[in-house]
Amino acid sequence: MTRLDAMAAKLAALGGDHGVGSEGPRAAVAAILRELPGADGADLFFIRRADRPTDPWSGHIAFPGGRREPSDASLLATAIRETREEVGIDLSSGRLLGRLPDVPAFLRAKRSGLVVTPFVFALPGDVPVVPNVEVATTLWVPVSTLARGEGKSTFKLDYEGQTFDLPCIHLEPGQHRLWGMTYRMLETLLDAVR
């Protein structure tokens, strides 16, 4: 059994539907794992969103994904479509490992009403990544590094005259800060596969 097979077994225990019939604004993301031949373990895929004034998560580290479109049959279909559009990865060549619990989105420290559903996929190996204009950069991070808590820290966020200490993970030392909604999703994923 590979490490990905062990993760899949643990994620299957979470169960859950694919968000069909959910009310209100919805979005879905894809947490993508790969295990390369001869590698010491699986890697997890992240994007850094492009800096855009109309994007409330501009510049953030995230999983590929986005809002559900009326033409999407389910939130799973949303995650697959958005991943293909944003980074050119066709998840039909991968394996759906499971669905993590929904995560409410916050904008400017207030609940936005948007709910995001994360799906976890495994790819059979390396795949080409072709980012679109919504993506500034992509990175693969070893799951073992994340599980050991490397780069975990806090940072100060000033908002409306108050300072908040928020948890984060510094990826590729000092280059990227993962925090917020993606941080919460990652913690849930790591808890599920430990």
Image (cartoon, rainbow, N blue to C red):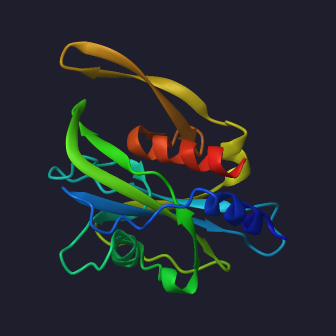
Instruction: Determine the residue positioned at 50% across, 24% down.
Output: 154
Check the image and report above or below for 64 versus 174: below
**Viewer-closest of 192 and 54:** 192
| Image side of residue 41 versus residue 85, left or right | right
Task: Name, please, the residue furthest toward the bottom.
Answer: 93
Query: Is residue 135 visible to us here?
Result: no
Q: Which quadrant does the N terminus fall into?
A: bottom right
Instruction: Determine the residue positioned at 74% across, 73% down.
Output: 36
**Viewer-closest of 36 and 80:** 80
Q: Position of residue 89 (x, y in %)?
A: 47, 78
Check the image and report above or below for 13 versus 150: below
| Image side of residue 27 versus residue 124, left or right | left
Instruction: Determine the residue positioned at 23% across, 37% down.
Output: 111
Residue 149 falls in image quadrant: top right
Check the image and report above or below for 48 versus 94: above
**Viewer-closest of 93 and 50:** 93
Q: Position of residue 191 (x, y in %)?
A: 64, 43
| Image side of residue 9 versus residue 32, left or right | right
Q: Position of residue 65 (x, y in %)?
A: 36, 64
Q: How many marks?
A: 0
Instruction: Determine the residue positioned at 40% across, 38% down.
Output: 180
Q: Position of residue 24 (x, y in %)?
A: 18, 55
Query: Is residue 52 visible to us here?
Result: yes
Task: Name, please, the residue furthest toward the left.
Answer: 54
